[in-house]
Image (cartoon, rainbow, N blue to C red):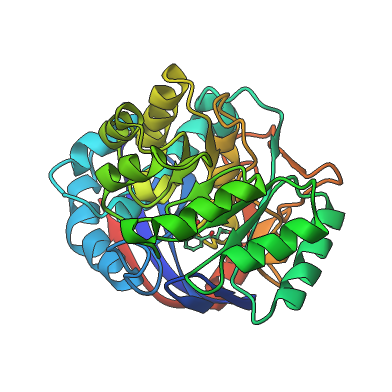
Amino acid sequence: MRIETITLRELRMRLKAPFETSSEVTWDRRVLLVEVGVDGLHGWGEITAAEDPFYNAETTDTAWHITKDFIAPFIIGKEVGNAAEIGNLLAPIRGHEMAKAGVENAVWDIEAQQHGVPLAKLLSGTRQEIPCGVSIGIQPSTSTLLEKIECEVRAGYQRIKLKIKPGKDVQVVAEVRRHYPGIRLMVDANSAYRLEDLEILKTFDEYQLLMIEQPLAWDDIFQHSLLQAQLRTAICLDECIHNPSHADAAIRLGACRIINIKLGRVGGHTVARQVHDISVRHSIPVWCGGMLESGVGRAHNIAMSALPGFVLPGDVSASQRYWDEDIIEPEVEVGPAGTIRVPVTSGLGYSVRRKRVESLTVRQEQWHA
Ligand code: OSB
Ligand code: MG
């Protein structure tokens, strides 16, 4: 296939409610969409960079710059046999995985359409439905948190993840456990702790957590291996894992027992599948993380989550939890058992509401072969 057009758009989308982690509060999302045109077909991808560099080093603006000045010129007019070859063309660009994933995933969508199969199937996915959990941001009070949890548990979600930070951690978890002794519960620290906080981190061992996600520095696998050796609770790495080599190092060092795979953080479906495969070989369960995506990114997350190693519920939840109105149709819905059906129609399996995309677009740039 020859890459004929690339369109990069920035959309403003306000979340239904602010989302607070240990490092930031997000309300107004600046969503970047990539649309690629090949032979009359259009594929969509989302660049999942945040507005600020507090999750990883990328931001909306660095991703725009890298896409405009490097990614688009490297691939426009190029002939590729399949989506997996996009990675080779972009290999000279170091880092910027989220920016690269936007284009690569759009080409995966096209390849699935060309074969007339759902993207999940093209990726070798085997699930008909995927198990879903929710990620709940830090709340102003424990009572509001308990209300949120009640609502999500009633909706059927299979696992609750709480964002934590120093001072809003063990007591909050203890209170939640007291009210919900049986739920599958986990916490995500987004790198808010140091090895010196060992005593605090050890106290989580009393609460039967499924895992503690990324407690230490965003770029330090070795320190997580020292911590994991001292904890009964499984560590799950998020921020630290960008490629199969990181996953291999983390697994062999014993730095984690679970891996969160985010398409953006690893640079797209090709590398995501490699991280999945290496994890499966080592019997390390994986699950799909989220970046407060629009429907386009969500649809890609659903396709990836159909792979057999995604045995734990992901942070992939209903469109309505995030947006008054999503940009895809149908919107992503979660059934009473806390699952999403993997689409069976070709490509992404959801259509992009072009009119709505245009009305939310605040800047746009296009490249032609
Ligand atoms: O660490 O998993 C994270 C959101 C933004 C940045 C980082 C993370 C998150 C989430 C939300 O946990 C997941 C979602 O619901 O999209
Ligand atoms: Mg995380």
Q: Is residue 39 above or below residue 60?
A: above
Q: Residue at x 30, y 72 (%)?
A: 61
Left or right of 181 in this view: 62: left
On the image, the x and y values in percent for residue 53 come to: 31, 70
In the depicted view, which residue is nearer to us: 40 or 66? 66
In the depicted view, which residue is nearer to us: 245 or 170? 170
On the image, the x and y values in percent for residue 178 come to: 78, 59
On the image, the x and y values in percent for residue 82 come to: 35, 29
Left or right of 152 in this view: 365: left
Q: Residue at x 61, y 30 (%)?
A: 311
Residue 325 occupies which quadrant of the picture? Answer: bottom right
Left or right of 153 in this view: 83: left
Q: Residue at x 37, y 28 (%)?
A: 274
On the image, the x and y values in percent for residue 249 come to: 27, 32
Left or right of 83 in this view: 126: right
Residue furthest to the left: 92
Q: Is residue 28 above or below residue 182?
A: below
How many marks are shown on the rendered structure? 0
Q: Is residue 85 above or below residue 55?
A: above
Residue 229 seen in the current view: yes
